[in-house]
């Protein structure tokens, strides 16, 4: 009964929840660590928690469908107009709304091999044609992506940094790419992990908006801002594009707890910096361990890293699960030798490394 695009669709595969693994293997949930969904290991910001508690009394009310306060806070932070912002139930929601607004069955949508799984999913859901462009190494081949544009192309997705590879393009490369894209094609620059870029490595899509009216930047509160469960993401674009997106999104797509927590956490610069610091240290910890174990990995600009554990990656993953460690196999991304592990707290990273060493030993 399903319509054309939906028939062949397979659902997005999320990281295994802790309770599910506990039930499956009879493990104590308190002894399980989850490094599978690029979540923030710090727990939520105290400012966000306080805002959520204060917002509980309003559960009987509809949220502000226009997200006035949060848009004001975002606009002030990024130096844009509130009318340029579209809020979503996670940035996934925004990605889906963008696709529905600007592509249809006649369209082509361009993304990279190994790019975030939601791009092909939202494309297929509307029966548009997904054009997966071979990667260069594991990163986006931006030249090839620009060359893949045809008269039918409506949208191009670029994740920067990309998930699950962690690869990133610098500001110059992104700008050179945008120069090559015709104005009639929209470019979605997905910056879900941009807060982890520091210093010279920072690439700011929002700064490019004035020069490229066909650009849409998407971001999220799920990663460095630590609010994955609340589901808040947003796009910044021209006001014209935002106006279209706001016509199609669900009227109350972001709930009041999410709105209030997101606005509160934007004030918690210390939390953001701690997120970055813990991530940078944890990344070093894992890289050092992988080097010592002789495992190759893809240098990552995100809060996760893809490590090559060999052909038996699924067996290694099973052994990790039995040891109460959840990471993410990424065979579904065409990377059957890699496991993607999110950066945890130092003790979680240690536990993962020890469990991985045991899993690799067992294999020999
Ligand atoms: N973009 C990328 C590249 C991601 O990795 C993710 C999270 N897995 C998202 C978007 C969506 O995140 P959310 O819906 O939680 O904002």
Image (spheres, grey):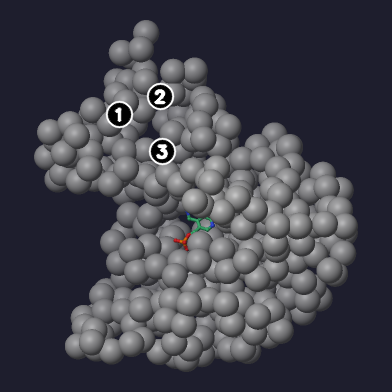
| Left-right relation of 87 to 285 | right
| Kind of element beneath mark 2 | helix
Mark 2 or 3, nearer chain start: 2
Q: Are marks 2 and 3 in contact (CB under 8 Å)?
A: no
Q: Identify the residue position indicated by label 3 in the image.
A: 328
Q: Secondary structure at mark 3?
A: strand
Q: Which residue is mark 2?
A: 314
- Left or right: residue 180 versus residue 85 is right
Mark 3, Cα crowd under 10 Å, few <14 / some 14-19 / many 20+, is: many
Q: Residue at x 33, y 87 (%)?
A: 62
Q: Give the image location of residue 78, x and y in percent.
A: 59, 81
Please, what secondary structure does the residue beneath circle 1 have? helix
Who's the residue at 32% across and 43% down the image? 16
Q: Earlier in the sequence, mark 1 or mark 3?
A: 1
Please state which of the two labelled residues, at mark 1 or mark 2, is closer to the viewer: 2
In the rendering, which numbered label is found on residue 320?
1
| Residue 193, numbered label | none
Q: Can the viewer see residue 198 in this picture?
A: no
Q: In terms of depth relative to the viewer, which is nearer, 248 or 231?
A: 248
């Amino acid at each position: 009964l399903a319509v054309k695009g939906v028939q062949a669709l397979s659902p997005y595969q999320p990281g295994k929840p802790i309770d599910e693994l506990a039930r499956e293997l009879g493990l104590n949930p308190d002894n399980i660590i989850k490094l599978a969904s690029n979540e923030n290991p710090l727990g939520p910001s105290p400012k966000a928690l306080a805002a959520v508690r204060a917002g509980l009394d309003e559960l009987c009310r509809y949220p502000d469908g226009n997200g006035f306060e949060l848009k004001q806070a975002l606009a002030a932070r990024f130096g844009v107009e509130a009318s340029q912002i579209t809020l979503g139930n996670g940035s996934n929601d925004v990605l889906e709304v963008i696709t529905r607004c600007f592509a249809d069955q006649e369209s082509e949508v361009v993304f990279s091999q190994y790019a975030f799984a939601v791009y092909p999913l939202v494309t297929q859901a509307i029966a548009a044609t997904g054009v997966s462009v071979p990667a260069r190494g594991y990163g986006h081949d931006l030249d090839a992506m620009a060359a893949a544009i045809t008269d039918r192309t409506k949208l191009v997705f670029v994740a920067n940094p990309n998930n699950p590879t962690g690869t990133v393009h610098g500001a110059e490369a992104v700008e050179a790419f945008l120069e090559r894209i015709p104005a009639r094609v929209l470019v979605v620059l997905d910056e879900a992990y941009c807060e982890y870029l520091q210093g010279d490595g920072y690439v700011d899509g929002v700064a490019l908006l004035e020069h490229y009216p066909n650009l849409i930047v998407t971001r999220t509160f799920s990663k460095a801002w630590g609010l994955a469960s609340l589901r808040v993401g947003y796009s910044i674009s021209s006001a014209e594009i935002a106006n279209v997106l706001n016509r199609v999104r669900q009227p109350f797509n972001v709930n009041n707890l999410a709105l209030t927590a997101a606005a509160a956490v934007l004030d918690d610069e210390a939390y953001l910096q701690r997120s970055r610091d813990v991530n940078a240290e944890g990344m070093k910890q894992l890289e050092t361990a992988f080097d010592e174990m002789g495992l190759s990995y893809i240098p990552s600009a995100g809060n996760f890293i893809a490590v090559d554990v060999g052909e038996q990656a699924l067996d290694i993953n099973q052994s990790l699960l039995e040891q109460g460690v959840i990471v993410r196999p990424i065979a579904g991304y065409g990377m059957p030798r890699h496991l993607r592990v999110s950066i945890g707290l130092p003790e979680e990273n240690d536990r993962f490394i020890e469990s991985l060493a045991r899993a690799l030993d067992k294999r020999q």
